């Protein structure tokens, strides 16, 4: 929910998105909770947001969702949205 970044399911964050700029370098990333042990978040205030929770695809769908099940469709969607071609360091040159 605005003004918070990421992907949300109600008041619980499913995916964190971040950008860091410093020393003339910009880095960015995301964390999609697929089958995360959510009990770890009981010990912190996730993303510094009081009163907000964290969730995962496995929790929301009521079944185990492994990263390997999500990776290919996620990367396909990323390429489509950003009109780019992703290259893996494992791809032959």
Image (cartoon, rainbow, N blue to C red):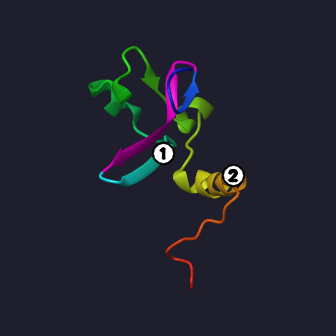
Q: Main secondary structure of the magenta part?
A: strand
Residue 30, label in figure? 1
Which residue is painted at 28% across and 26% down in the image?
Answer: 44
Describe the element under mark 1 as helix, strand or loop.
strand
Which residue is painted at 34% across and 24% down in the image?
Answer: 48
Left or right: residue 39 versus residue 36 is left
Q: Quadrant of residue 1?
A: top right
> Magenta residues?
10-22
Describe the element under mark 2 as helix, strand or loop.
helix
Q: Residues within 10 Å of mark 1 (few under 14, many from 20)?
A: few
Closest to the observer: 44 or 20?
Answer: 20
Q: Is residue 24 above or below residue 44?
A: below
Residue sitting farthest toward the bottom: 93
Closest to the observer: 27 or 64?
Answer: 27
Q: Residue 88 appears at what percent x and percent y?
A: 54, 71
The number of callouts visible is 2
Q: Is residue 1 above or below residue 77?
A: above
Residue 76 forms part of the magenta stretch: no
> Which of pointers 1 and 2 lies earlier in the amino acid sequence?
1
Residue sitting farthest toward the front: 24
Q: Residue 57 appears at what percent x and percent y?
A: 56, 37
Q: Residues within 10 Å of mark 2 (few under 14, many from 20)?
A: few
Q: Residue 14 appears at what percent x and percent y?
A: 52, 33
Q: Residue at label 2?
A: 77
């Amino acid at each position: 929910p605005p003004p918070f970044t990421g992907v949300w399911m109600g008041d619980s964050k499913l995916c964190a998105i971040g950008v860091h700029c410093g020393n003339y370098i910009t880095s960015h990333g995301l964390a999609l909770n697929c089958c995360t042990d959510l009990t770890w978040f009981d010990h912190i205030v996730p993303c510094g947001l009081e009163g907000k929770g964290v969730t995962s695809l496995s929790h929301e769908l009521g079944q185990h969702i492994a990263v390997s099940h999500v990776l290919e469709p996620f990367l396909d969607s990323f390429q489509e949205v950003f009109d780019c071609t992703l290259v893996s360091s494992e791809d032959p040159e």
